[in-house]
Amino acid sequence: ILGLIVYLGMMVGAIMLGGLADKLGRKKCLTISLAINAAFAFLSSFVQGYGFFLFCRLISGLGIGGSLPIVFAYFSEFLSREKRGEHLSWLCMFWMIGGIFASAMAWSIIPHYGWGFSMGTKYHFHSWRVFVLVCSLPCIASLVALKFMPESPRFLLEIGKHDEAWMILKQVHDTNMRAKGEPERVFTVSYIKTPKQVDEFIEIQSSTGTWYQRWLVRITTTFKQVWDNVLYCLTAQYRMNTLMLAVVWFTMALSYYGLIVWFPDMIRYLQEEAYESRVKIFDEEEVSHFTFNFTLENQIHRNGEYRNDKFSGMKFKEVRFEDSLFEECYFEDVTSSETFFENCTIISTVFYNTDLYEHKFINCRLINSTFLKDKEGCHLDFEEDNDFLIYLVSFLGSLSVLPGNIISALLMDKIGRIKMIGGSMLISAVCCFFLFFGNSESAMIGWQCLFCGASIAAWNALDVITVELYPTDKRATAFGILNGLCKFGAILGNSIFSSFVGITKVVPILLASSALVGGGLLALRLPETREQVLM
């Protein structure tokens, strides 16, 4: 549910903030997006309640989603036609570098439970909180760096600020000349196309109504203009391209994000099968006056009797007690995961500072037993089996896209966007079919890396063609709508694919392959924009 919450926030943020960027400016809206993400990502590392944590991740996702359409529109408006596809692909690579950073941090931080700290007995800053905190730092750094960046000159021209746009273009020109080592030349502009102003902001006098009425008019006017931009993307001139792009974005997201979740879930399922095959079963054991101060793991105890035993400073990991008796026992400083007492009788037993909460006792009779000072914090169990391998899988999946990213960047302006999208999606569909032969952890990891590496070129080309097909005053809006639809596909893919883990591989593989083939063939009907000047 955590991943779905973030995707939901990203979907709303992409549509809402992407539309606002065409009216309020790229830099201003990108600053707002980064600030929202940074603030709530930072806050989520400290909150205690699970519900509040989900809320923080939802709002953080809104900031993440909002930044995506804005940053592509913003960056593209500084680039020349000849290198635009290549440089936008390099920009895409930093999204992948961020994924590598997050995977590496999860791999290196979360398994180290000692990296956290406690403040008293009620507040525990666990290692996963350290991970969330560390992952918010790049966003904070980006927010600071953005303060030194100029507004998009194309946006300034759209709103009639020609002098500011000219100064920024001159600054870009002078910087490029110095970088090339060429002598300084006078920057001249021979022609500026003044855009036709379709809509105007309503000037509101301070004497008009109350302050909140004035703000209400401003807000409703702004959102009306955003809605007009949305409708413009569906006018006769852009309708067919918008609908085809929507299908390609959706099919790509459905298959890619669905499989990205399905891969680690399948690997975890294979691990659990192997783990359960090694379970130890104890029947009718009788233990008295014994101290358990070591970890019990992957065990089932049936019809046992435990009298005057002490369980101290230990951990239960994947342990079940069934139809057993505990009499005058003492549990102290005990932690547990996936541990349950079923149909047990517990007499005159004390539980002190444990996380053996009520839901872990199923159909049990507790007679004269006492629970003192339960452990604070989240009552959920977290699976810890082979965490190292799961983090490694995520890291390798992120790392595997880099070669494909580099190749697509170098070829983007040579073979064109359309061939890149269609070819990448069809190759990715072929990779999906070979998943039928992935019956081991190593095979699944290998096919995941191949699939991610093959599909990244389609993502890059989709980003490029989307910013090139729409005019400046509609660019971020269109990208936001399509990216929001992409996140809806991700939510749907996550839900569908994860529901078939452990049941069948046929449905996820055929669904992903069919979506990729259909989207790839449709992409070949899109217009090529390689030689197109930004509108």
Image (tube, helix red, strand yellow):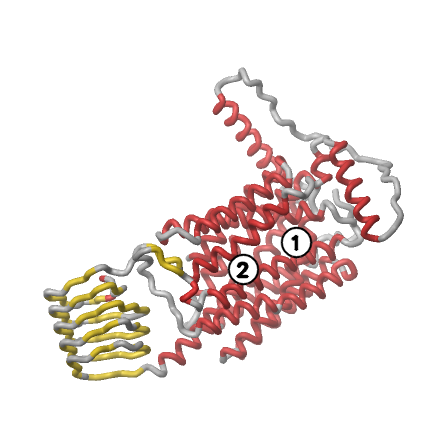
Q: Which residue is mark 2?
A: 254
Along the line of sight, the residue nearer the viewer: 328 or 367: 328
User: Helix or strand or loop: what does disc 2 sit on?
Assistant: helix
Q: Position of residue 106 (x, y in %)?
A: 49, 64
- Mark 2: few, some, or many residues within 10 Å (few <14, many ≥20)? many
Q: Which residue is mark 1?
A: 463
> Relative to residue 517, is residue 45 drawn left or right?
left
Along the line of sight, the residue nearer the viewer: 130 or 420: 130
- Mark 1: few, some, or many residues within 10 Å (few <14, many ≥20)? many
Specify whether residue 458 is in view: yes
Along the line of sight, the residue nearer the viewer: 79 or 40: 40
> Relative to residue 190, is residue 306 drawn left or right?
left
Residue depicted at 60% across the width and 49% down the height: 142
Q: Position of residue 64 (x, y in %)?
A: 54, 50
Along the line of sight, the residue nearer the viewer: 95 or 293: 293
Question: Which marked residue is nearer to the observer: mark 2 or mark 1?
Answer: 1
Answer whether labels 2 and 1 touch (C-beta < 8 Å).
no
Residue depicted at 73% across the width and 52% down the height: 527
Residue lying furthest front in this view?
Answer: 120
The amino acid type, in three-letter code, at marker 1 is Asp
All told, the count of numbered labels is 2
Residue depicted at 59% across the width and 50% down the height: 141
Could you tell which of marks 2 and 1 lies nearer the N-terminus? 2
